[in-house]
Image (cartoon, helix red, strand yellow):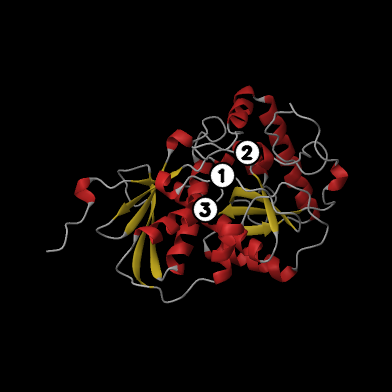
Amino acid sequence: MSTTLLDVATLEKLIEAAVAAPSIHNTQPWRFRLDPHTLTLEIRAAPERGLRHTDPSGRALHVSVGCALFNLRLAVAHFGWAPVTRLLPGPGEPDLLASVRLGGHARFSPAPELYEALWRRRSSRFPFSDRPLPSALLTELAEAAHTEGALLSRAGLGGSARVLRVTREAERRNTADADRGAEDRRWIREPDEAAVGIPPAAVGPQDYRDHVPMRDFGAHRHPAGLDARAFEKRPTIAVLCTAHDRRADWLRAGQALQHVLLVAEAHGVRASLLHQAMEWPDLREQLVRGSQDGRSHAQMVLRLGYGPQGPASPRRTAARSVERPTPQDTPPAPG
């Protein structure tokens, strides 16, 4: 397609691809703005959809935006442009987290299966089978994270037990914290015109006490979940890390996370995200303690496996996600 023109339908498709990304509690804490002069899409934080108690530093918000950024890059390349990406491009604008300029004709087309996977990908909180993931696939997932500047390490048997133990402790703390519990429950909502939050049908079963520590959004005020025996006996657990822990690293972690999730989806592998330990600094440090590189910083815990697809969570429309340009932003009419 043309590398100089961007029609409304294509712009909407680019934004729809970006907002299909996962975000903590499905808060979708982003907004988009097009600079029509330079054909640059800016991704800005939507702090009103941040989580004051769960994510006081904004780290999870940045990781969420990084996921959307990867989808946007993928869609831009799918439509024939080279995505020219900048992280934190405006030092004086702290809410401007990233920009993607639609550059010249893309030299390399992205793998079409990843673009197709972004529309299918959903988090699954359901039990997985005990079928192991092939070694070649685990290597491919690690390479996907490495491409985006992150490290994905599969935890061995003892490592998985440690990661799940730390996650279980984080879930216990979350449940005991009244403010965090109330914040969690506030984001469980029936779909409405805002199209944010987690619909009750997507919460899924709980097995936080016995085996796989899923987040208990109901703070124990619901019937017991599935019996622990329904979950896989040896969950495949991986930890996504970065070498540093700055805002740009959080954005890179989000891009790496989404790249990994889409490669997994393209191979029919489901994923659930165990974020609880990220929310407690001392527990987050324990996730990398004793690892090959204890200096790294954990950004996400992933549970991977074969199983049912999770239900879809609502997404804001492209029209609700894009800021309208101001008159001075609009290019003059030709002639």
- The residue wearing badge 2 is 199
Under tag 1, what secondary structure? loop
Foreground residue, 296 or 272?
A: 272
With respect to residue 46, does 15 lie above or below? Answer: below
Residue 47 falls left or right of residue 185: left
Q: What residue is at 60 percent from the left and 24 percent from the top?
A: 179
**Residue at horizontal 83 percent and vertical 57 percent from the top:** 130
Q: Residues within 10 Å of mark 1 (few under 14, many from 20)?
A: some
Point out the tag, 3 or 2, that comes first from the N-terminus. 3
Question: Residue pushed farthest top?
Answer: 178
Q: Mark 1 vs mark 3: which is more N-terminal?
A: 3
Per the image, label 2 sits on a secondary structure element best described as loop
Q: CA distance from mark 3 to mark 2?
A: 21 Å
Please say if 17 is above or below 212.
below
Whether label 1 touches label 2, CB < 8 Å: yes
- Res. 6 image quadrant: bottom left
- The residue carrying mark 3 is 67
Left or right relative to 180: residue 93: left
Residue 48, position as x, y percentages in the image: 44, 33
Label 1 – label 3 distance at C-alpha:
16 Å
Q: Which residue bears the numbered disc 1?
A: 314
Instruction: Estimate the x, y position of residue 166 in percent, counting from the top left.
Output: 72, 40
Label 3 crowd bin: few (<14), some (14–19), many (20+), radius 10 Å: many
Query: In the rendered view of the protein, which quadrant contains the N terminus?
Result: bottom left
For image coordinates 61% across by 41% down, the residue present is 278
Picture coordinates of residue 208, whole percent (x, y)? 77, 38
Cα–Cα span, label 1 and label 2 = 8 Å
